[in-house]
Amino acid sequence: MLHASALDPTPTMVPLAPIRIIAAPGDADRSSGNVHDHASRTVLLSRIAGLLDIAIGESIDGATLHVPADALDRTTAERCAIRRHDQILGGVVPAPFVASKAITHGLLHPDAQAPRDWSAAMAELMGDAALNGYTAFNREDAFAAGQRLLATGPVRIKDVCAKAGLGQIVVHHASALADALSRETDEDLARDGIVLEENLTDVVTYSVGCIELAGRTISYWGSQNLTTDHQGRNVYGGSDLYVVRGGLDLLAAEPLPPAIGRAVACAATFDRAAHLAYPGLLLTRRNYDVIEGIDAAGYRRIGVLEQSWRVGGASGAEIAAFEAFRDEPDTHAVRCSTVEVYADIDPPTGATLYFRGVDPKVGAMTKYAVRLA
C-alpha cells in the first residue's frame, strides 16, 4: 500500500496476543513496530494499572482487561474470551478492514468489488459527515473513482492502514493517479482497499473521542499538532484535549464554538453509522479525526477522516484526564495534552514521560502527556 518511505511499518491489524493488564506487558513479537511505540504502550499500561489501583499481574474482579495495540478482529477476540466492554480498552471488529480508513467512504457503484462483510449502509448513514470520496478494492475501480473526483479538484490517495498522517499522496491529473495506483499490488488492494477523497487546503484536524474504563466514561474534543520528523516530513506531534465527564451526547451539550460543534456532530454520526452498519462492534476507546478546510471550489468543508478504535497518540492525555477526575470529584472538565517531539528534550514539570531516547527507526524522540488546566 503506497510503498513510499512515508509509510509507518506498523500495520493497523496485528495478529498478536494483546497486552493484558493481569499479564506481563509486552508484544508477542518485539520486531514489529517502533521502539518508542512499545515503550509508550508499556508506560500507558502502568498508568492504567495505577488508575485502577491494581498492580500489573493482578486481576480486576477476576477478569482480564485487554489493552491491545490495535483493534482486534472477532476471531482473535473470541480466542481471548473478550465478550464485554469491561474486558477491553480498544475495539473488536467483525473483519480487519472495519478498523481501517476503508469504511469512511462508499464504493464507486453497488456492484464494485468489496470484502464479504462490507456494508453499503455505512456510507448512506454517514451522509455528509465525511468528505467526498470513495473506497476501492481493485485498480480499475480506484482509477475510475479518482477520475471522477479529479473533475472537481485534486485528489488525496490514502493507504487505509497507515498511521500518523503518513502513507498519503495528492494527485492533480490522471497520469499521476495512474502512476500512484501502479505501485499498489492486486493482493493489497483486494485485501485492504484504498481511499480516494477530495483534497482540502488550509486545514485543521480535530480529535473527537469517547472512552469507557472501569465503569467511567469521558469524552473530548481537541486539535492535533504537527511536528517535523528527522526526514523533514510533517507528522503527528500530539493532541490538545478538552475533556468532560460522560459520553458524546454530554460533550455535544457543552457551549462549543460552531466549528467544534460541527466536528463533534460529524464524529457522533460516524459512531452511530458504524454501530448500525456493523452490528456486534465492541468499542470502549473511540477516537475520530475530523478535518476542516477549503475545497477546490473555495468552500469550507468539514468531515470525518478516520476512526481509531485502539489506544493511540492521544491515549496518554485521556488517562491523564481520568486521573484528574478521580482525584477531583467536583471537576467538570480538564485540559490535557500529549506531545511528540523528534528531539531529546526535558518534559515540563509534572508531565508523564512516555519515551525519551533514540529510536533505531525514527531517531531521537521525546513523548509525554501533561495536564494543562
Image (cartoon, rainbow, N blue to C red):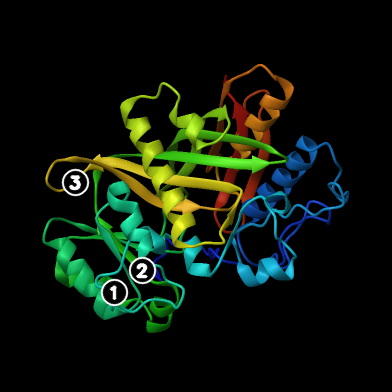
Along the polypeptide, which appears first: circle 1 or circle 2? 1
258 above or below 23?
above
Q: What residue sits right under mark 1 in the picture? A: 181
User: x, y (%) of residue 324?
Assistant: 67, 25
Q: Is residue 164 visible?
A: no
Determine whether label 2 and label 3 are within 8 Å by CB: no
Query: Where in the figure is residue 110, as x and y percent of width and height?
Result: 27, 74
| Badge 2 density bin: few <14, some 14–19, many ≥20, Cα 10 Å | many
Inspect the image, locate mark 1, and give the three-letter code of the amino acid beneath it.
Leu
Seen from the viewer's position, the closer of residues 87 and 359 is 87
For the residues labelled 1 and 3, the Cα–Cα distance comes to: 23 Å
Crowd around label 1: few <14 · some 14–19 · many ≥20 (10 Å): many
Front: mark 1 or 3:
3
| Residue at x 21%, y 67% (from the top left corner) | 146
Q: Which badge, 2 or 3, is on the more N-terminal residue?
A: 2
Q: Please state the horizontal and vertical placement of residue 142, each as a whole percent of the image.
A: 27, 73
Q: Is there any visible trace of residue 191 in the rendered image?
A: yes
Label 3 Cα crowd, 10 Å radius (few <14 / some 14-19 / many 20+):
many
